[in-house]
Each structure stands twice: as C-alpha cells, then as structure tokens.
C-alpha cells in the first residue's frame, strides 16, 4: 500500500512538473529588449533557471541579482517586466510567480540571437553576365544562425543555412522579374530587393559592353534629333512670320500709296 502511495505521489510530481513546463518560446536580439507579458502586481518573483532575479513587494521592485541592475525594469502600473540590453547569456527559462492578487506561475524560454547581418548583392565580383543566364550572389558578412533565401514573390528559389553566400542563377526568360534576398534567423530578418533587369540588363544584348555602347549612342543621337526638330520648328515659324510680315508691309504700303495715287 505504501509502495502504491509512493508511486502515486511520484506520478503526481511528474504531472505537476510537466504542468510547469515552459509556456512559450520567446526570441530576442542581442542589444534589444523584451517585455514579459506576465503581470506581477502585488507580491511575487521573476526567476531565471529557478533562481530569483527580482522581487515585487509593496508596489516596489527589488533587483536581487546585480547583473540585472539598470537592465531589468518593472512597471508599477502594469506589473510587467522588461529586460533591456539583451545578451546571449540572458537565454534561458524565465519563471513568473505571483503570490497575491492574481495568483499564478508561468514560465517562458527566451533565446537571444545575434542580429542578422544585412544581405548584399555585390555587383562587381558576383554578377556574371553570360549569354544565357545571369548569376547573382547574395552575401552576408557573418553567417551564424542565419539562413539565406532567394525569393521571387512568395516562392523560394534557393536557400541555405549558415552560409556566407547563396547564388541564384536566372535564365533569360526570368530576367524581367524582381527578386529579393532575405537573411533570417529565428528572431529577425533583413531583406534586400534586387532589380534583376538593372543588374542583368546586359543579357538583352549579346554582352554587357554592347548594351552600354548602345545606350551611349542613344544618349548622343536623341539630343541631336531633338535639337534638329526644335531648329526646324523655329525656322518654320520664323519663315511664316517673315512671309506674313512682308505681306502686311506690302498692304500698308499699298494703302499708303493708293490715296496719294488718287490725288
Ligand atoms: C510608479 O513609478 C513612477 C516612476 O516610474 C513613480 O513616479 C510613481 O510614483 C510610481 N507609483 C507608485 C504607486 O509607486
Ligand atoms: C561567368 O560565366 C562564364 C561561363 O558561363 C565563366 O566562364 C566565367 O568564369 C564566369 N565569370 C565569373 C566572374 O564568375
Ligand atoms: C542554389 O544554390 C546552390 C548552392 O547552394 C547552387 O549550386 C544552385 O545553382 C543554386 N540554384 C539556383 C537556381 O540558382
């Protein structure tokens, strides 16, 4: 009978520890901040890995661990804790234990990630314009837990985890679309929109240099044609004005001379 009781107690302990399991997963970024949405208003504790970090009592919050001075804030109206200046070492299970008023316990696992490096598409070394396809290389300075993805609208065209670069080869028929490279970790993502036609524009011709020359010649021809049109227009108007003017002069002269002829 005693053995049975022990087994029951053991199972109850198991169940109760399971009930205390982490309520949610939270993600933060180094240097950022996080507000825990568990209000401790009257009397209670916040703990990290079961070690109390701060205590709320009589409308005041006492920080119990020195490393949280100036970083852990408690709002006396909402009862919420905010941790600022997040560090990787702040990762862990945070417990909230409110013993008065709204009585509850809860816990969350916080994981603090490095900030994601902004992606870049380096046009000088990484854009390869050959006759049939164009390869763009998306780069980040720091890989870490970063995943690189190439997107076209909502479609993933290529992806790779913990890599410093990710190529995307586009064929002639895809060159009008726009793409974006996304660098992401579980906490944040950064996006770079790529104007494919601008970077791979040379493919419309046989080579990039050819298209540059063509653009340059357009830049010369267009102003010349415009100037010619303006000049012709000016001549035409001037010509008509001149003719009309001449005509009026003749008429005036005629009028002037006619009376005198009458005399
Ligand atoms: C709450 O905190 C503010 C400053 O953060 C303080 O001015 C105010 O007196 C506090 N209220 C109570 C009831 O302690
Ligand atoms: C570009 O592609 C061509 C063949 O498609 C290759 O021979 C050349 O080495 C590539 N250039 C660069 C810079 O990757
Ligand atoms: C996707 O990336 C891999 C390298 O990670 C590369 O070999 C492959 O060509 C890329 N696919 C496309 C469609 O660009």
Image (cartoon, rainbow, N blue to C red):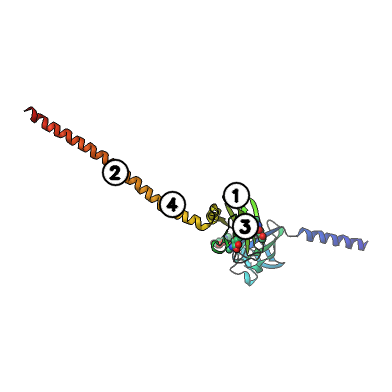
Q: Residue furthest right?
A: 1
Q: Earlier in the sequence, mark 1 or mark 4?
A: 1
Q: Can you give x and y, in whole percent of width and height, for residue 23 in the image?
A: 72, 57
- Whether residue 227 is visible to the viewer of this picture, yes or no, is yes
Q: Are marks 2 and 4 in contact (CB under 8 Å)?
A: no
Residue 66 x/y as whole percent: 63, 72
Q: Secondary structure at mark 2?
A: helix
Give the CA distance from mark 2 to mark 4.
Answer: 26 Å
Do labels 1 and 4 touch, CB within 8 Å? no
Q: Establish whether ligand 2 lies closer than 8 Å to the Cβ of label 4.
A: no
User: Which quarter holds ligand 3?
Assistant: bottom right
What is the secondary structure assignment of the residue under circle 3? strand
How dense is the environment of label 3, judged by Cα within 10 Å: few (below 14), some, or many (20 and up)? some
Task: Point out which mark residue 168 bears.
Answer: 3
**Distance (Cα) linking label 2 and label 1:** 48 Å
Q: Kindly indicate the quadrant of the structure image that contains residue 193.
A: bottom right
173 left or right, relative to 259: right
Task: Read off the residue under disc 4.
Answer: 218
Disc 4 crowd rating (10 Å Cα; few below 14, some 14-19, many 20+) is few
Label for residue 235? 2
Marked residue nearer the N-terminal end (2 or 1): 1
Residue for badge 1: 173
Rounded to the nearest angstrom, the CA distance separating label 1 from label 3 is 14 Å
- Whether residue 257 sits left or right of residue 172 in the image: it is left
- Spatial distance from mark 2 to mark 3, Cα to Cα? 56 Å
């Amino acid at each position: 009978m005693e053995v049975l009781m022990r087994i029951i107690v053991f199972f109850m302990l198991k169940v109760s520890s399971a009930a205390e399991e982490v309520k949610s997963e939270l993600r933060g970024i180094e240097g950022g901040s996080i507000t825990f949405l568990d209000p401790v208003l009257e009397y209670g504790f916040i703990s990290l890995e079961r070690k109390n970090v701060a205590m709320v009592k009589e409308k005041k919050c006492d920080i119990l661990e020195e490393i949280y001075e100036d970083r852990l804030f408690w709002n006396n109206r909402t009862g919420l804790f905010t941790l600022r200046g997040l560090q990787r070492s702040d990762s862990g299970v945070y417990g909230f234990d409110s013993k008065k008023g709204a009585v509850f316990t809860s816990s969350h696992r916080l994981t603090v990630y490095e900030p994601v490096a902004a992606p870049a598409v380096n046009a000088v070394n990484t854009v390869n314009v050959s006759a049939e396809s164009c390869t763009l290389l998306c780069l980040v300075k720091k890989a870490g837990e970063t995943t690189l993805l190439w997107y076209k609208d909502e479609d993933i065209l290529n992806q790779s985890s913990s890599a410093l670069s990710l190529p995307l080869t586009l064929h002639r028929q895809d060159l009008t679309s726009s793409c974006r490279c996304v660098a992401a970790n579980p906490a944040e993502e950064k996006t770079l929109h790529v104007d494919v036609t601008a970077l791979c524009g040379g493919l419309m011709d046989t080579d990039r240099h050819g298209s540059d020359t063509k653009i340059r010649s357009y830049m010369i021809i267009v102003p010349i044609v415009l100037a010619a049109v303006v000049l012709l227009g000016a001549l035409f108007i001037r010509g008509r004005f001149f003719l009309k003017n001449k005509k009026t002069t003749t008429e005036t002269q005629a009028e002037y001379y006619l009376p005198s002829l009458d005399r």
